Image (cartoon, rainbow, N blue to C red):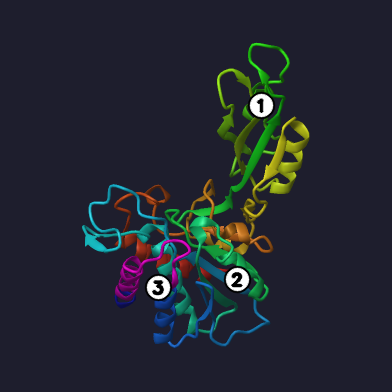
Amino acid sequence: MAETFEQAKKLLISLIETFSISRSESGTAELLCKFFKKYGVEAQRIENNVIVRSKNFDESKPTILLNSHHDTVKPSDGWDNDPFNAVCLDGKIIGLGSNDAGASLVSLIFTFLHFNEVEKPFNLILVASAEEEVSGKNGLECVIPTLPEIAFGIVGEPTGMRMAIAEKGLLVLDCKAIGKSGHAAHSNGINAIYKAMDDIEWFRTYQFPKKSEFLGEVKMSVTCINAGTQHNVIPGECSFVVDVRSNELYTNQELFDIISNAVQCEVTERSFRLNSSSIQVSHPLVQSGLKLGLEMFGSPTLSDQVFMTKFPSMKIGPGDTLRSHTANEYIFESELQQGMETYIKLLEGLEL
């Protein structure tokens, strides 16, 4: 295992030191294709997504999807060193994407390689996806339709190797209250701001009745507002934006329909694509994790799980989500090793 860990560490450092900001991940895509070729694994590339399949793929066996992403956000301010230059210090690997989600991706890659040469009761497909940080259409979303039937998925994200068995979705709404412009000194206008205030109060106070055990209730937040051009003109329009975090008990379409019928303003969705997801506690993957003593929780952050609508999936990986998108992002070497070991044990403990 020591030799495997050194190989994994080397790959992670290479990924950190290869530019891979979302929508510009061709360098890491090429790096991963060359890496798999070195191990005798044929890689397929769709856009900047890299896909590999089990040796001796058998359609009669269930297929498990392993997924994590190789794109990163832009580096934030405050880095002590070059974020694209990996630094190994005090048991840490410091660099952009080390925690989110390089360590998870590398751990899943070496899990795939571990099982690729042994007889097993399942197939594995690994997708190193692009554009995850921007939920881009040329990321996992364009790969899913090309895959064979998937039994379930494992999504690598920094969870401290806790099992996220549910993940919140996102629905962004553009709202517009329509009034009538007029002179502020007269009473011949209808103030769109006042109309918007009534709806904003509804967004602030309404509670959807279905509350999730792991994700809690649907959360709505008004995050932007715009109206008016000058002090003496009653505004005829007031626009505002609502951020809706959905639980697995509602689809984004269902939430949109409820909201549209409850408020006076015009409501337009930006997308219905980013739905909440979940997996049953009774699922063999979750049961395997429970036998290992892994903790279950509901995740408030989005991942490529939003595109896994036709099969169950679980999010789990080494690292800490609070380090993601921060200056001096890092992963402990011990976390990288724990990630590889735990993924392997999860799959070995499956009772399919």
Q: Residues within 10 Å of mark 3 (few under 14, many from 20)?
A: some
Front position in the image: 26 or 154: 26
Q: From the top left corner, tell me how far across and down residue 1 is, in percent.
A: 33, 75
Q: Is residue 16 magenta?
A: yes
Could you say which disc has been placed on residue 196 in the image? 1
Mark 1 surroundings: few (<14), some (14-19) or many (≥20) residues within 10 A? many
User: Which quadrant of the figure has residue 18?
Assistant: bottom left
Q: Secondary structure at mark 2?
A: helix
Residue 14: x, y in percent?
Answer: 32, 71
| Mark carried by residue 27 | 3
Question: Do callouts 1 and 3 mark residues in contact (Cβ within 8 Å)?
Answer: no
Rendering coords of residue 284 (x, y %):
61, 64
Residue at the spot 50% in from the left edge and 66% down from the top edge = 130
Question: Residue flagged by tag 1: what amino acid is it?
Answer: Ala
Tell which tag, 1 or 2, sits nearer the viewer.
1
> How many numbered marks, from 0 up?
3
Q: In terms of sequence position, does the residue under pointer 2 or pointer 3 come before the other?
A: 3
* Kind of residue indicated by mark 2: Val
Mark 2 and mark 3: span between their CA atoms? Answer: 19 Å
Dot placed on the residue nearer the N-terminal end, 1 or 3: 3
